[in-house]
């Protein structure tokens, strides 16, 4: 049951998502997501600006004429959003000089993507974990589903730990048609099993996008002095001389980010880093533009 | 710069407090909620940070606060040339007004304020005029004059208190005594005890018309030491003791204080006393001013002079005075006459009158210090020194240092709050 507060939250999130989408959609020439179930329809003469991807090279070789292949989409694209709702995403906590925590940032990005995907006639679903239980919304289209999906996102709270592997496995299994698995996480929990699972998803024909969300504090570690650092997920407390440990920490995080990116690209996944110090619309626009360019 | 209270600089040791606090006081490790610990190696918390001082700016401010407070308590005075000049033009004057009984007699001052009234009234008027006067020792003073008027029945005994007050004044100083200056009221020794830097001014208010009652000495000589005795001892040979008692009775009949009155410790040694020669040999010279004064009065007593002349002698040929070797503080008056002689009776009368302790009677004496004598005792006030000018809290510049302390406290508070705000900004995930 949706309470007035939840409805308000949904409205806020939907409004924010719509604002973000509207702010950059005019700059996008075409959809960054393409359906895989499109069927060839006809040829037409090549016009300036057509994507060379759809140029029929065989006809060009035989006749020396430029023809563009056209497809008729029979089904919509299905995108499964995998959103990390673990406690590690609840950082930085207020008071903060930043607008949002990683979780709030990730939820907003996921909502904007869902809005965009459904708005262009495709299907979007959601898999995440709340209180050690899967939250699953199948990939569908339509305004009511979009509102339900955004409502589910708005109800999420960063809490406890989560199993990235299990979420990804479920996402791959539950995505009926070939589609896109789009994971929004800090990927601290990513292991070799995680990447193996991602490769398996890709082998099933799905496209995999990794959106890694980190805050500047996690990268720069601007803390000094003796600090008792508490793990947000495990609540383990470790005494750290922050000033002395900062340099080593930064190097380790840089290596971690490089490793995540390298592994993703090596496995053929789409990888994009989202820093919470960048406005969500700018970050999303950059991501979508790059994705459009790659497709 | 001069410090009025240099002992307060001991407070500078208190700067060890902030230093120790910064060295030894390990800050409570703050708690930071963080996404993961995998990149953060644990470190062993150090019990103290002896090797490095934390928050140097705060430490410097706190040391400055403590040091400034210690300096402020030390009452610093910056003696600038202008200030020294200003102080040099000022005069502190303590005026002692003699209110002894003799001052209640009519004033003998011809003309002037209070002429014709009581001497005490004239003295008070003079004291008031002096306190307000801008002249001192013939010099016109352009600066302010700080005065204090003290009335005392024994001016000599009040001098130390007046000197103490004067020494606390950061300017030139003068002690003024307004009195009829009976010889018993002030001696040269009293004046000599006034520190050299303090000027002495003696304003004489003549008192007239007095009939001298029997001589007494309490007011003249201040507190007694040792305790007074009940009567003057008469030391005569065994055969003459009855005659000595008779001589005392004759003296009392001739105006000497009756038996039972307190006297200064005194003994009259007549010729024929068994150990007189030994006593005379062992006796000390007169060592107290009252002894000399009393003996001189006895020797100049008209009846004694007449009796000595009748015997064919001058008084000092038949009289001698010593301090008792066995009873310190006792006057021994040696008389070369038998107790039954007229001279012995005259001496007994004179001694009894001079050493009696009737407070009212002593003030009836008419002998006063001469004007020349008083002028010799006078002296001008010395110039103010830097050390002198530093006396008195009103001249202290401590208030400016306290002002600096307040500013430092504000700065310390500002820096502390700023650091706290920065720390909070740094740690976005502080656990409450």
Image (spheres, coloured by chain):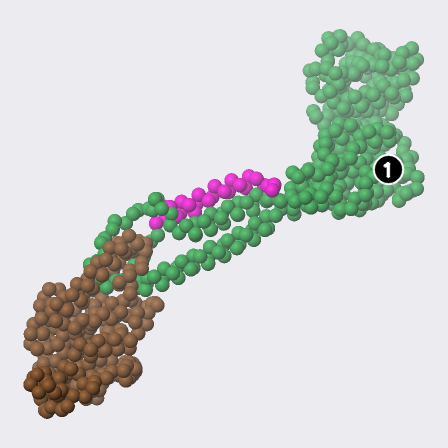
Chain colours: A brown, B green
Which image quadrant: the C terminus of chain B?
bottom left
Q: Is residue B382 left or right of residue A53?
A: right
Q: Is residue B10 magenta?
A: yes
**Left or right side of B424 for A153:** left
**What span is colored magenta in the figure?**
B1-26
Name the spot of residue B241 as percent of width and height, x first.
Answer: 79, 13
The x and y percentages for residue A1 are 22, 84
Q: Closer to the camera, B234 or B112?
A: B112
- The residue under label 1 is B205
- The chain carrying label 1 is B
* Rendered view: A54 above or below B235: below
Instruction: Give the left or right position of residue A42, taking residue B71 as reference.
Output: left
Position above or below: A251 against B329: below
Question: Which residue: 49% across, 49% down?
Answer: B65
Image quadrant assignment for residue B422: bottom left
Q: Position of residue B406 (x, y in %)?
A: 53, 54
The answer to whether residue A115 is above or below residue A237 is: below
- Please state the horizontal and vertical placement of residue B391, each as a whole percent of the image: 65, 41
**Would residue B49 be counted in the magenta stretch?**
no
* Depth order, front residue of B291/B79: B79
């Amino acid at each position: 049951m949706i309470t007035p507060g939840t409805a308000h939250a949904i409205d806020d999130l939907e409004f924010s998502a719509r604002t973000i989408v509207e702010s950059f959609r005019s700059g996008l020439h075409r959809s960054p997501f393409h359906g895989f179930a499109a069927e060839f329809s006809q040829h037409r003469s090549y016009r300036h600006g057509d994507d060379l991807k759809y140029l029929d090279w065989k006809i060009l070789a035989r006749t020396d004429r430029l023809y563009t292949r056209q497809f008729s989409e029979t089904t919509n694209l299905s995108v499964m959003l995998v959103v990390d709702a673990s406690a590690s995403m609840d950082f930085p906590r207020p008071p903060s000089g930043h607008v949002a925590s990683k979780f709030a940032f990730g939820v907003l990005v996921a909502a904007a993507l869902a809005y965009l995907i459904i708005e262009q006639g495709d299907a979007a679903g959601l898999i995440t974990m709340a209180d050690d239980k899967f939250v699953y919304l199948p990939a569908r289209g339509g305004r009511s589903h979009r509102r339900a999906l955004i409502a589910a996102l708005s109800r999420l709270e960063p809490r406890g730990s989560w199993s990235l592997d299990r979420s990804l496995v479920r996402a791959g299994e539950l995505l009926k048609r070939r589609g896109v698995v789009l994971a929004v996480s800090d990927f601290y929990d990513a292991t070799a099993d995680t990447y193996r699972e991602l490769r398996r998803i890709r082998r099933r024909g799905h496209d995999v996008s990794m959106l890694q969300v980190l805050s500047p504090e996690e990268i720069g570690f601007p803390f000094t002095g003796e600090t008792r650092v508490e793990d947000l997920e495990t609540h383990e407390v470790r005494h750290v001389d922050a000033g002395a440990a900062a340099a080593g920490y930064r190097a380790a995080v840089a290596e971690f980010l490089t490793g995540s990116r390298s592994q993703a690209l090596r496995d053929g996944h789409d990888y994009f880093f989202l820093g919470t110090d960048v406005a969500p619309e700018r970050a999303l626009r950059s991501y979508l533009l790059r994705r459009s360019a790659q497709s | 710069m001069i410090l009025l209270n240099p002992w307060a600089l001991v407070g500078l040791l208190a700067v060890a407090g902030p230093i120790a606090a910064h060295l030894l006081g390990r800050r409570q490790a703050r708690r930071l909620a963080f996404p993961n610990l995998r990149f953060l190696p644990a470190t062993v918390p150090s019990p103290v940070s002896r090797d490095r001082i934390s928050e140097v700016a705060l430490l410097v401010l706190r040391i400055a606060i403590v040091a400034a407070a210690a300096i402020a308590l030390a009452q610093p005075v910056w003696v600038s040339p202008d200030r020294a000049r200003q102080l040099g033009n000022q005069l502190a004057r303590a005026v002692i007004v003699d209110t002894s009984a003799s001052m209640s007699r009519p004033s003998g001052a011809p003309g002037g304020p209070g002429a014709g009234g009581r001497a005490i009234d004239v003295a008070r008027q003079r004291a008031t005029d002096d306190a307000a006067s801008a002249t001192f020792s013939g010099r016109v003073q352009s600066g302010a004059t700080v005065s204090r008027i003290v009335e005392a029945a024994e001016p000599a005994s009040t001098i130390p208190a007046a000197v103490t007050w004067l020494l606390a004044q950061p300017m030139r100083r003068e002690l003024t005594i307004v009195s009829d200056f009976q010889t018993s009221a002030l001696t040269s020794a009293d004046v000599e005890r006034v520190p050299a830097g303090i000027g002495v001014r003696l304003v004489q208010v003549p008192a007239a018309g007095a009939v001298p009652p029997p001589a007494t000495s309490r007011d003249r000589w201040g507190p007694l030491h040792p305790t007074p005795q009940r009567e003057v001892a008469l030391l005569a040979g065994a055969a003459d003791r009855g005659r000595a008692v008779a001589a005392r009775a004759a003296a009392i009949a001739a105006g000497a204080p009756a038996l039972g009155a307190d006297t200064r410790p005194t003994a009259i040694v007549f010729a024929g006393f068994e150990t007189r020669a030994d006593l005379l040999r062992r006796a000390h010279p007169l060592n107290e001013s009252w002894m000399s004064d009393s003996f001189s009065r006895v020797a100049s007593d008209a009846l004694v002079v007449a009796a000595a002349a009748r015997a064919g002698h001058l008084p000092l040929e038949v009289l001698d005075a010593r301090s008792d070797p066995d009873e310190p503080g006792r006057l021994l008056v040696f008389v070369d006459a038998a107790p039954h002689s007229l001279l012995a009776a005259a001496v007994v009368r004179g001694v009894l009158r001079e050493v009696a302790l009737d407070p009212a009677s002593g003030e009836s004496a008419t002998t006063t210090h001469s004007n020349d004598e008083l002028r010799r005792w006078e002296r001008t006030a010395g110039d103010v020194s830097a050390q002198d000018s530093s006396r008195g809290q009103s001249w202290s510049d401590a208030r400016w240092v306290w002002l600096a302390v307040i500013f430092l406290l504000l700065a310390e508070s500002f820096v502390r709050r700023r650091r706290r705000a920065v720390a909070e900004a740094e740690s976005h995930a502080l656990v409450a």
